[in-house]
Amino acid sequence: MNNVQQNCIIACIGSGNMGLALMKGTQKQRCAVSGNDGAGKTSGDVSGSGDACGVRIFFTDADAEKARIAAAAVGAGVYNSNTEAAENGDFVFLAVKPQVLPQVLSEIADTVKKRINAGSPPVIVSMAAGWPVKKIQAATSVKLPVVRIMPNTPALIGKGMIALAASPEVPPEKTASLQNILGGAGIVDRLDEHCMDAVTGLSGSGPAFVYLFIEALADGGVRAGLPRDKALLYAAQTVLGSAAMVQETGKHPGELKDMVASPGGTTIAGIAALEDGAFRGTVMKAVDAAWRRSMELS
């Protein structure tokens, strides 16, 4: 993690599932540098200390108790307000719902402007769907450095997919540092911001589609006579293993499918049933619907 900015402060405004997931990933990265396993950190320590590599994390939330609980989970500190977060954070994460974002931006705008004028601008990191960089800058009336990310819920276990797009105002070394910081939460991929709505439809919403598929597979197993717990185990591991095959072999999914489907066998019979139900077309429509909704929000 040589590219991580040393002695930097990460301020996370919002302590919900996604904000907490990303901060847990950051904790993994800083512990990897320090050789610390994360044990023995002070819960809710207002100093945000406990990491030898100098990366400190702080939470703030409208629900102060929720912020304290999140801080305790990752050995972080707690700020008393969003303004305090904006005053101190090198990276200020906006981990709030899109409908709450205007209020948060209004609260921190003056503080961010002062820091920009003083030559020490924070990097604003937003994960709000429907909020492009220009919209965030317009809401604060300043060309502040903004990184827009789109993570997904598997970041909670370090298996997320995180798309990242930085505005021109973000120095390259800051972008590189942020990529490294987020690496503990999953794969971080840089792309043009105009692709972010498509990412929202695919990997942002996609876990819900996959969970539905796993549930359906398990239901099929139960219908065929498997106990529910066994059916769910087999379904989840089948999806997990199949995804790993795509990533690790580099083979096209169609090629891997053909490796399973023997002539006149059970698999091709099942594939035919899926095609009768327009399976692939329906999945494409689901991603398309989520993509279009993301554009509407923008």
Image (cartoon, helix red, strand yellow):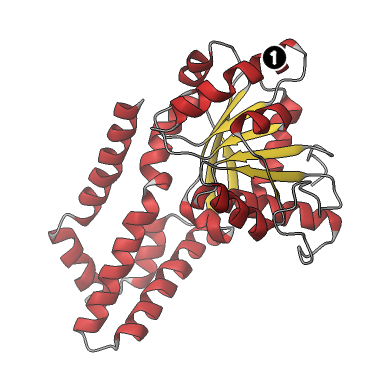
**Residue lying at 65% horizontally and 14% vertically, measured from the top left:** 113
Q: Is residue 114 above or below residue 100?
A: above
Q: Position of residue 226 (x, y in %)?
A: 28, 88
What residue lies at 65% left-to-right and 19% top-to-bottom?
A: 112
Name the residue beneath numbered marker 1.
114
Q: Is residue 74 visible?
A: yes
Taking 86 as reference, is 289 left or right?
left
The crowd level at tag 1 (other Cα within 10 Å; few <14, some 14-19, many 20+) is few
**Amino acid type indicated by mark 1:** Lys
Left or right: residue 51 versus residue 65 is: right
Viewer-closest of 178 and 39: 39
Q: Is residue 72 above or below residue 99?
A: below
Quadrant where the C terminus is found in the figure: top left
In depth, the one of 235 and 34 nearer the eye is: 34
Across and down, in percent, residue 70 comes to: 60, 54
Tell me the quarter of the picture where residue 178 sits: top right
Badge 1 marks a residue whose secondary structure is helix
Residue visible at 65% across and 45% down in the picture: 182
* 100 over 56 or under it: above or below: above
Q: Horizontal and vertical percent for residue 26?
A: 68, 50
The answer to which quarter of the image holds residue 212 is bottom left
